Image (cartoon, rainbow, N blue to C red):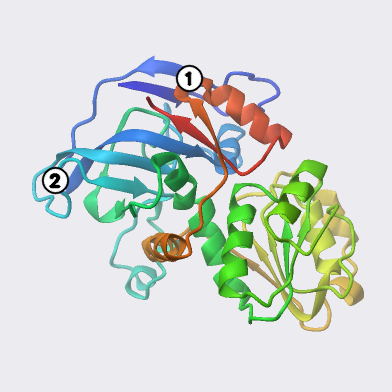
Amino acid sequence: MKAMILNQTGSLARQPRPLIQADLPDPEPGPGEILIRISACGVCHTELDEIEGRTPPSRFPMIPGHEIIGRIAKAGRRSKRFKTGDRVGVGWIYSACGQCEYCRTNRENLCPEFRATGRDAFGGYAQLMTVGENFAVPIPDIFSDAEAAPLMCAGAIGYRSLMLTGLVNGRRLGLTGFGASAHLVLKLTRHLYPDSPVAVFARSPREREFALELGAVWAGDTADIFPGGCDAVIDTTPVWKPVFEAMKNLRPGGRLVINAIRKEDHDREVMAALDYPSQLWMEKEIKSVANVTREDIRGFLKTAAEIPIKPEVEIFPLEEANEVLHALKAGHLRGAKVLSMD
């Protein structure tokens, strides 16, 4: 099979082509596993975190990618959930133990044996992959392969983030950063909480314009103040400064939800300037999002299909994965970026 592989970590600036195209043996599904012929895989900022070493792969070489859509090519022994040709998706959660206190209480995202697709097991920047059948989910017919791919992570993690805000219809939501996840959260919020104004804080004029097109009531720079403030803010950026600025926009009792697996270190010093009385006092909260559960993915797909929510996507051939990653790093965003295997 054809795949894009990562052999080492390092700054994207120092390794302009971190992924190498390779021909690898076709994988075979083990007991309880399925073999998926991949048609599309979304490109997520977490791939940059892996490449640059903030959340490094557990081994090398690694095939990144965790927003995967494809069809069942073969089932291993004792695999009975799907039949050949069924369309399925795989997200960030590749496996969990199923037995610990977190797994038993519907918090498998916190499992100490959590394994991530494309970080701890070969992911979707390839033509084929294997995964346990219980960690693949059916894809609603309403979505094309390219539309469905970003829903597996950007959509599901956005859905989990929105639920963690505790937002009530009519309360004010802020979104810091406006990439693949945030633009889906905006669409979701407008449906679930139709009376809740959404403000967007983004460094790029293009992102701010896109947010207003999708129904944001206000869009400003990351450091701007939204008149009246926000009852909740979801931060989807890879850096610290937006966290610092978002707290200025929180109303008393407000909650900041940080939707990022890692933060880049180069601006960590901004947090040293935290002003407790104006930014964190008055029972403001900060909550992080850790991974996703399978229920997050299933719940979001069901809701997205009913609304429906379809992401804005840009499609690229698998061979251009490096170029797409550089565009993502530079913030050249409008919706989500998807690699096609065809």
> What number of labels is visible?
2
- Mark 2: few/some/many CA within 10 Å (<14, 14-19, 20+): few
Q: Amino acid at mark 2?
A: Pro
Tag in front: 2 or 1: 1
Q: Which of the 4 image quadrants contains residue 69?
A: top left
Residue 26 appears left or right of 318: left
Q: Which of the 4 image quadrants contains residue 196?
A: bottom right
- Give percent across and percent down for residue 10: 62, 27
Residue 120 to residue 26: above or below: below
Residue 71 to residue 304: above or below: above
Residue at the (44%, 37%) spot, across then down = 41
- The residue tagged 2 is 31
- Give percent across and percent down for residue 282: 82, 83
Q: Amino acid at mark 1?
A: Glu
Residue 330 appears left or right of 249: left
Q: Secondary structure at mark 1?
A: helix
Query: What number is the disc on residue 319?
Result: 1
- Give percent across and percent down for residue 305: 42, 60
Query: What number is the disc on residue 110?
Result: none
| The N terminus sits in image quarter | top left
Q: Nearer the viewer, residue 32 or 327?
A: 327
Are the residues tagged 2 and 1 within 8 Å (C-beta)?
Answer: no
Residue 227 appears left or right of 230: right
